[in-house]
Amino acid sequence: MNDVLKNIEDIKLEALIALRGASSAEELEKLRIEYLGTKGRVTDLMRSLGAISKEDRPKVGQAANKAKEEITLLHKEIQENFKNVKSEAPALDVTLPGRKPARGHQHLITKTMDEICQIFGKLGLSIVEGPEVETDYYNFEALNFPPNHPSRDMQETLFVGDKLLLRTHTSPVQIRTMEKTKPPVWIVVPGKTFRRDDDITHSPMFNQIEGLVVDKGITMADLKGVLTAFAAAFFSPDTKIRLRPSFFPFTEPSAEVDIACVLCGGQGCRLCKGSGWLELLGSGMVDPALYGFVGYDPNEVSGFAFGLGVDRAAMLKYGLTNIRHLYEGDLRFSRQFS
Ligand code: PHE
């Protein structure tokens, strides 16, 4: 008899453990069939009681009934739990914290461009853009570079077809704009430019912002005033600038504009190579020859223009030691300017 009682106890324990381990309603149903179904192990057990002797039957019968009862009860309880879980759990738990996408930010070049355009915007210049692949006419000829003139050598680039090239500066947009609009013209032109230079302060692709103001009575004082205001807004309020005589075929007179060294303030240091000044941009009064190409009357209007290297401005403002940092896509660099 003891064997029979132990068998009943074993089956009961096995069933209870299995039921508790059920992880889904389907698994639970399988266990119900395995133990309590018409061919289940508990049902078999009940059937086999007929073979037990009369004296033992009450005790064994009682144990078997109790085991079945316990198993049935636990099954019911767990079945209820599964039902509740099913009805309570929404398909989508909107209370779970969301996955936060990594947030990007502007590249230092774009940020600097935007900043510069905004400053000139406040001074009344609006943004115009032009093509990066340019014709010889707009890049050189209409800017007063005669064919085969040595001044073209200052700006060597890649030709992509007959008289078609990657623009060497944003100045062609001066002509394109004046061709299309009557004076007054107050514009800035941000964009990519290309030359064969490549060293720690020059890259073959770089960015410029061109400025052009053509109106009645514009003088070099206006040029200096606008650029002084720009330097104050972009670098620091008391940044000094100086104009150095220079040459560009499309401006006369022409001036290279320097700012007082951002590191030493003009004392002379390693950055400014002891001079106290840093070269920032090229500029000048629009050469009247250009007005001939676009149909403006040089007796009516005058103007100034400038071309500023954005990469250079960013290098000076943020103390970059190598222009290539701007183009390598190294996140350790980019993230410093979020
Ligand atoms: N286009 C000249 C350059 O890239 C800069 C410049 C622009 C100079 C406008 C004068 C006036 O070197």
Image (cartoon, rainbow, N blue to C red):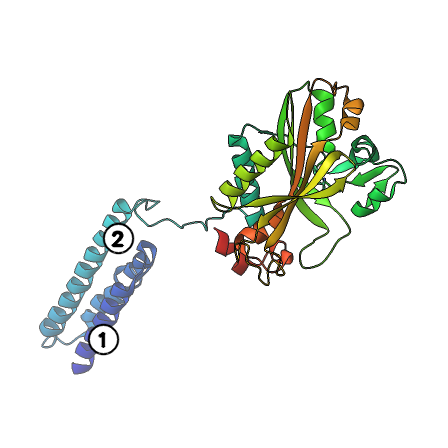
Residue 134, located in which quarter of the rendered image?
A: top right
Compared to 75, does 130 lie above or below?
Answer: above
Q: Residues within 10 Å of mark 2 (few under 14, many from 20)?
A: some
Measure the C-alpha gap from mark 1 to mark 2: 26 Å
Q: Quadrant of ligand 1?
A: top right
Residue 226, located in which quarter of the rendered image?
A: top right
Q: Is residue 111 left or right of residue 71?
A: right
Disc 2 residue type? Phe
Residue 328: % across, % down: 62, 57
Residue 62: % across, % down: 11, 69
Q: Residue at (78%, 51%) from the top-left corner?
A: 196
Residue 176: % across, % down: 73, 27
Marker disc for residue 10: 1
Residue 81: % across, % down: 22, 53
Disc 1 residue type? Asp
Reading the image, the residue beneath label 2 is 82
